[in-house]
Amino acid sequence: MSAKPNFRALIAPVVLLSVALPCAAEADQTTSRWETALADTKPIFNARLRYEGVEQEGLPEDASALTYRFRAGFETGKIFDTALLVEFDHIDDLIDDFNSTINGKTGYPVVADPNATELNRFQLTNTSLPDTIITLGRQRIGLDDARFVGNVGWRQNEQTFDGARVQNSSLGELKVDFTYIAQINRIFGDDSAVGRWDGDSYLLNLSHPTPIGTLTGFAYQIDVDNAGGVFSSQTVGARLAGKQAIGTGKLGYTVSYATQSDYGSSSLDYSADYYLVEGTYSVEAVTLGAGIEVLGGDDARGFQTPLATLHKFQGWADKFLTTPTTGVEDIYAKAAYQVGDVGPFSGVALTAVYHDFSADVGGADYGSELDLAASAKWDKIGITLKYADYSADDFATNTSKFWIQFDFAL
């Protein structure tokens, strides 16, 4: 019988290459550091299997996609206050009756999970400076609720960023988060013409706790050389999110405002506003909520959030991934129930959301959408069922989607 592979032995050469060689006088101390880094190294592994079915009016075929993803890698312990993380993704399909955006099956609805094998993350994280985390390389970034910057974790191939990030908390309770981005690695993969965006982009996020919630200010300068700079923009805004005990429950609230204009390589001349007002009330296992989110528009361009985790917002049917020039007003209500343990399943949760969509400019009635979800865990396996039904009036076409997903992680 062959010997069982030794994980530490496999990653040892990578650890050695990730740090500078010390002088000979420090050899013993450095050897000890390497040993500690190896001992503290943690493997990364998770897998996901998902079926997605789509019926979209106006297309000759219905989509059936059964895709899977393996994600594997490791993160070393710290040596010279620096840790190395390496992670790969492999995405493939078992049923391919869908438009993956690169397979040429344009008669089917889009399910944006193309086949790919890629380096997902490759980063060095350093904590040498007090109250500071510096991350260099290909990394995952999610800011606030991911409305403006996120990793699009819903899709099989997540969005990552090549750049440098500095997070600092040395100024009392003020948290400073600054990132320079040279490349955006999008969900469409290396084989897609729109799989990589190049350019010099800057993200600044400042947050501070207050008695009524966390106050955040942000400025995002996104300069994308691809597609004639149409996705380049400058967004400046603020956000307040908090919770207060009211009676036997908790009142949650979020308000946000931002303004956006053309920037960098953009050939457009536009200005658009964004605002969000949301309230929730939770009593024991039940949460009820409602809100209004508006992405404004003008004659040239609607307010865009190209780096966001877009599936999380404006309905799971994904009809508003690109904001129309007349903008989008989304009035929504939602309810959630934390069921708890049911038989062999733990953490059972139910969610329902209703959206009413209309134009911010001109008053057109775009349509409405009903979203339903159920989730649970069975041992180490996460199970998710989701359904979205978009009913069109003046925008797009009737679309229904169904998902069943299984997740496993070490």
Image: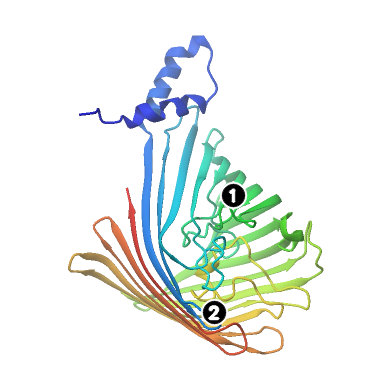
Disc 2 residue type? Answer: Leu
SS of the residue under disc 2: loop
- Towards the viewer: 270 or 158: 158
Residue 343, how many percent across, how many down?
Answer: 17, 68
Residue 164, how many percent across, how many down?
Answer: 62, 43
Q: Earlier in the sequence, mark 2 or mark 1?
A: 2
The relative height of residue 331 versus residue 169 in the rendered view (above or below) is below
- Towards the viewer: 15 or 282: 15
Residue 237, how many percent across, how many down?
Answer: 67, 65
SS of the residue under disc 1: strand
- Towards the viewer: 232 or 215: 232
Disc 1 residue type? Answer: Phe
The residue located at (61%, 60%) in the rendering is 307
Relative to 69, 314 lies left or right: right
Residue 19 shows in this picture: yes
Quadrant (top left/top right/bottom left/bottom right) for the N terminus: top left
Residue 193, how many percent across, how many down?
Answer: 64, 56
The residue located at (42%, 69%) in the rendering is 52
In the rendered structure, find residue 59 and report the number of the disc placed on it: 2
Q: How crowded is mark 1: few (under 14 residues within 10 Å), some or many (20 or more)?
A: many
The residue located at (67%, 90%) in the rendering is 363
Q: Quadrant of residue 163?
A: top right
The furthest residue to the top: 25
Relative to 19, 4 lies left or right: left
Q: Which residue is under mark 1?
A: 161
Q: How crowded is mark 2: few (under 14 residues within 10 Å), some or many (20 or more)?
A: few
